[in-house]
């Protein structure tokens, strides 16, 4: 019998991290590789935020934090939810964790019993199903194809809800597709959820500020207030303020759930890094000009990438409304022969051959639960994006 836990055999390693690792190895071996696999802004953290962290160190904010988060940050988060999302949470209803990732994990540890189902619209962020499985739950995938703009429809949601449904995970703007929802679309989904009072909703609003529509961002509990009592609203500073390495995420929700998550966190990490928490207070309370600046740059890059990819043979690239990813279909390349002589049968073959032939690293769609597609992260410099898209065009033109 293996020394390792049986649950490990049900979990897959992260495909996005695997692509990043492969790109790194090729670069080290001397290949000219452009990595479009990473899910993090290429900008540096704004100086006012860095300064707040340095000041916190100098003040001696270097002791264990309160498990749920330092009081000024919980207050800043409650104010952020009120200011930006019209959601009324007391600071005690807020938990700060080591990244949004840990918030999700805490929520599943705190609530899942064996056999509980979690509805995950596909394509999905790679970590959702693995976290559910690791905590004894069962992912219930709902296909959201390119024809619906990769969006969950009320009909598909209704059909997926069953006796064992515990949670719906709802992520918009989405990683990996960039799909975003209008308040009206959210209300239509909300109507379905109102009819199923046993289902809880976990909204992952990590990409809230990277939205390129005229209509402002809305989150589910805001669009349909009747869901407030059973919604965990999750967010973080990683993407909004280019703070991926600081590892701060947060959520707010009903008292009982937050208390359970805090209890778990107390036995796990004792809370998130104090210095990163002080930096996050400044991120949320300080000047917000970084957000529109980065949004404008990302929108320009999105337009560039969508236009160039649509000029590649066999590629169809919708223009997403948010996040920093595009999720083009490579169906038109399936069955063709790559320069290596190998035939492209799947989207995984497509990305492998592309990396081999042109040194461009992207992630295959099947890793996100829906293909044949691939995910391109445009969180990299415009020059590199132009070069990478030219290479993808050349690669697609070389297929026979
Ligand atoms: C959809 C989504 N949710 C959550 C996270 C986790 O973010 P973090 O742990 O950096 O706060 C990510 C990061 O890639 C993401 O894409």
Image (cartoon, rainbow, N blue to C red):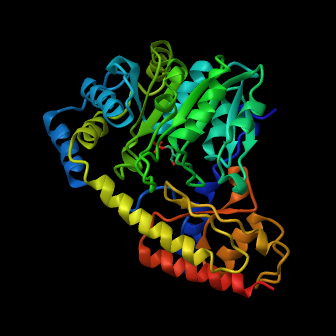
- Residue 172 in view here: yes
Quadrant (top left, top right, bottom left, bottom right) of the N terminus: top right
- Give the side of residue 338 with respect to residue 201, left or right: right
Q: Is residue 362 above or below residue 204?
A: below
Between residue 29 and residue 214, name the one nearer to us. Answer: 214
* Residue at 26% from the left image edge and 27% from the top image edge: 63
Give residue 68's position: percent from left, percent from top: 38, 22
Q: Is residue 239 left or right of residue 280?
A: right
Q: Which quadrant is the C terminus positioned in? A: bottom right
Residue 283, how many percent across, how many down?
27, 43
| Residue 233 percent coordinates (x, y) | 47, 30
Residue at horizontal 66 percent and vertical 28 percent from the top: 192
Instruction: Tell me the quarter of the picture where residue 336 sits.
Output: bottom right
Q: Is residue 293 above or below residue 393?
A: above
Q: Position of residue 227 (x, y in %)?
A: 54, 23
Say which quarter of the image contains residue 66: top left
Q: Up-down: is 92 above or below 43?
A: above
Which of 60 and 158 lies nearest the eye of the viewer?
A: 158
Would residue 29 be visible to someone looking at this image?
no
Task: Give the farthest residue toward the front.
Answer: 184
Measuring 85% from the left and 74% from the top, which residue is drawn there?
335
Q: Quick one: 259 or 323, which is closer to the camera?
A: 323
Q: How many marks?
A: 0
Residue at coordinates 55% horizontally, 54% vertically from top-left? 178
Residue 186 position by quadrant: top right
Left-right relation of 282 to 26:
left
């Amino acid at each position: 019998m293996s020394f390792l836990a049986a649950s490990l055999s049900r979990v897959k390693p992260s495909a996005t991290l695997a692509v990043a690792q492969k790109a790194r190895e090729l670069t080290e071996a001397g290949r000219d590789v452009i990595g479009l696999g990473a899910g993090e802004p290429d900008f540096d953290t704004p100086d006012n935020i860095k300064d707040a962290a340095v000041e916190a160190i100098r003040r001696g904010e270097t002791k264990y934090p309160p498990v749920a988060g330092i009081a000024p940050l919980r207050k800043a988060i409650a104010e952020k939810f009120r200011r930006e999302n019209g959601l009324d949470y007391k600071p005690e209803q807020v938990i700060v964790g080591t990244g949004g990732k840990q918030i999700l994990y805490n929520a599943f540890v705190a609530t899942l019993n064996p056999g509980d189902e979690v509805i995950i619209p596909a394509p999905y962020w790679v970590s959702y199903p693995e976290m559910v499985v690791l905590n004894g739950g069962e992912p219930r995938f709902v296909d959201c194809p390119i024809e619906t703009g990769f969006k969950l429809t009320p009909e598909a949601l209704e059909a997926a809800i069953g006796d064992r449904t515990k949670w719906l995970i709802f992520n918009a703007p989405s990683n990996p597709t960039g799909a975003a929802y209008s308040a009206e679309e959210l209300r239509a989904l909300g109507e379905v959820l109102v009819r199923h009072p046993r289902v809880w909703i976990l909204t992952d609003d990590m990409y809230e500020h990277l939205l390129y529509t005229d209509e402002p961002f809305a989150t589910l509990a805001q669009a349909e207030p009747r869901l407030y009592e059973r919604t965990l609203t999750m967010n973080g500073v990683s993407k909004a303020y280019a703070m991926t390495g600081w590892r701060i995420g947060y959520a707010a929700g009903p008292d009982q759930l937050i208390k359970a998550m805090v209890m778990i966190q107390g036995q796990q990490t004792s809370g998130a890094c104090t210095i990163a928490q002080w930096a996050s207070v400044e991120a949320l309370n300080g000047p917000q000009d970084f957000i529109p600046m980065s949004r404008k740059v990302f929108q320009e890059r999105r337009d560039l990438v969508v236009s160039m990819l649509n000029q590649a043979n066999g590629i169809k690239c919708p223009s997403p409304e948010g996040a920093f990813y595009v999720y083009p279909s490579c169906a038109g390349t399936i069955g063709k022969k790559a320069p290596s002589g190998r035939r492209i049968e799947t989207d995984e073959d497509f990305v492998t051959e592309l990396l081999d032939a042109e040194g461009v690293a992207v992630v295959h769609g099947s890793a996100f639960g829906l293909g044949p597609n691939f995910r391109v992260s445009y969180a990299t410099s415009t020059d590199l994006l132009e070069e990478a898209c030219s290479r993808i065009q050349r690669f697609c033109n070389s297929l026979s």
